[in-house]
Image: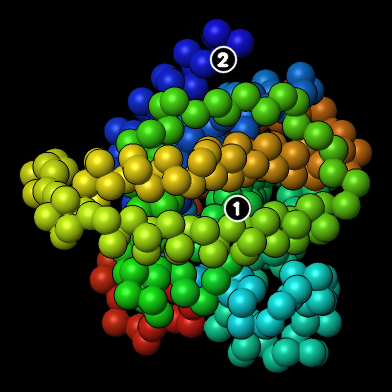
């Protein structure tokens, strides 16, 4: 257990070398990286050999949001726009959901649980076909969407407090708090379990996120009444920039009021990422991953380089539907 804690701290240090934004450059990378260590012996060799790939590309879906049509809605589901008990009433089949609600509505309000189920199927097929490149990039992307499903503010139309004069709360919850405080989190989850009903599991995760939304918003609102503006915010040096940020005092007290919520959701995400990878492998017939190439092909590396170039270029396209902050 002591070794595991030391390893987690080392991983946190490594992924923190990049600036944290969204449930992203810090948390997404840490979640994908640690999920590798929940896998069984038959999988962990292949995944450990590619752990840097899975870590570095954990944030790739965020980079695609503004340049790839249809990408943005894959990260969230506005549960509240569909009424009470929506997570129990919405169709589990995407085709049924389109027939009931229309695709325009779905893309406007998010499709993350359907996206996770779709990608789990794709990963299963990639395992069956013994396609190293597809296994790797689907695993990295799937980890991202699963982690997003575990964020409360990815389960509400008021995703950045823009409807309640709490703009900025999104980055506070899923970036600022982990950045400052996750070195003290317990990320030990045990071995990845096989999921008999993966569809139900990801919908339950979205439901859990939606249920937490009220406290996320309410505690920040209550705490803001206690902190004057000059104590709620401060300025910090990020590289060559001086940026305005939530103060450490405000962040710590907010974190305390949430009573471990961010840690619990990160731990859930880590466990589910490993579980979905493992379940896809089992459903594919448990292929021998030791017979696969131990690294992505040159073609895959070139594809990633091209995608990075495309997402780095400014776009003049019309805004895509979905959360834009």
Q: Residue at x 50, y 71 (%)?
A: 72
Q: Under tag 1, what secondary structure?
A: loop
What colour scheme governs how the chains and residues are painted in the rendered image of this protein?
Answer: rainbow
Report x, y in % for residue 299.
Answer: 52, 47
Q: Is residue 298 visible?
A: no
Q: Is residue 10 left or right of residue 140?
A: left
Q: Is residue 135 left or right of residue 214?
A: right
Q: Quadrant of residue 314?
A: bottom left
User: Residue 213, position in %: x, y?
Assistant: 55, 63
The answer to whether the residues at label 1 and label 2 have Cβ atoms under 8 Å apart is: no
At x 81%, y 76%, the residue is 89
Q: Viewer-proximal residue, 156 or 316?
A: 156
- Which comes before the other along the chain, label 1 or label 2? 2
In the picture, residue 65 is in which quadrant? Answer: bottom left
Q: Is residue 42 above or below residue 233?
A: above
Q: Dot 2: few (<14), some (14–19), or many (≥20) neighbours within 10 Å?
A: few
The total of numbered circles placed on residues is: 2
Residue 148, given in percent of the width and then of the height, sits at 56, 56
Residue that lies at the very extreme toward the front in this rendered image: 226
Q: Judge the density around disc 1: few (<14), some (14-19), many (≥20) Cα neighbours within 10 Å.
A: many
What's the mark number on residue 150? 1
Q: Which residue is identified by label 2?
A: 4
The one of 296 and 36 positioned closer to us in this rendering: 36
For residue 188, say whether it is visible. yes
Q: Is residue 144 above or below residue 78?
A: above
Q: Residue 130: give its label.
A: none
Front in this rendered view, residue 112 or 211: 211
Secondary structure beneath dot 2 equals: helix
Rendering coords of residue 324 (x, y %): 39, 74
The quadrant holding residue 78 is bottom right
C-alpha gap between disc 1 and disc 2: 23 Å
């Amino acid at each position: 257990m002591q070794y595991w804690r030391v390893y987690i701290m080392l991983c946190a240090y490594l992924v923190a070398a990049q600036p944290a934004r969204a449930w992203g450059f810090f948390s997404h990378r840490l979640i994908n990286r640690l999920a590798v260590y929940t896998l069984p012996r038959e999988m962990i060799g292949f995944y450990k050999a590619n752990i840097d790939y899975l870590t570095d590309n954990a944030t790739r879906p965020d980079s695609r949001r503004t340049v790839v049509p249809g990408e943005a809605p894959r990260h969230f589901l506005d549960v509240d726009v569909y009424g009470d008990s929506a997570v129990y009433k919405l169709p589990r089949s995407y085709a049924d959901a389109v027939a009931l609600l229309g695709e325009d509505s779905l893309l406007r309000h998010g499709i993350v649980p359907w996206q996770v189920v779709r990608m789990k199927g794709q990963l299963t097929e990639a395992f069956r076909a013994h396609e190293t490149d597809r296994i790797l990039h689907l695993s990295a992307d799937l980890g991202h969407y699963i982690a997003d499903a575990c964020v409360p503010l990815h389960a509400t139309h008021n995703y950045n407090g823009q409807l309640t004069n709490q703009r900025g709360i999104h980055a506070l919850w899923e970036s600022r708090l982990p950045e400052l405080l996750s070195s003290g989190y317990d990320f030990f989850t045990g071995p990845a379990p096989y999921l008999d009903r993966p569809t139900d599991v990801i919908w339950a995760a979205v439901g859990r996120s939606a249920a937490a939304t009220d406290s996320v918003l309410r505690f920040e609102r209550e705490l803001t009444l206690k902190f004057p503006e000059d104590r709620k915010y401060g300025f910090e040096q990020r590289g060559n920039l001086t940026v305005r940020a939530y103060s450490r005092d405000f962040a710590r007290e907010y974190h305390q009021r949430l009573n471990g919520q961010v840690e619990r959701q990160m731990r859930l995400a880590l466990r589910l990422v490993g579980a979905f990878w493992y379940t896809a492998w089992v459903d594919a017939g448990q292929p021998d991953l030791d017979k696969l190439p131990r690294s992505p092909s040159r073609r895959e590396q070139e594809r990633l380089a091209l995608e990075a170039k495309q997402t780095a270029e400014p776009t003049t396209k019309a805004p895509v539907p979905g959360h834009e902050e």
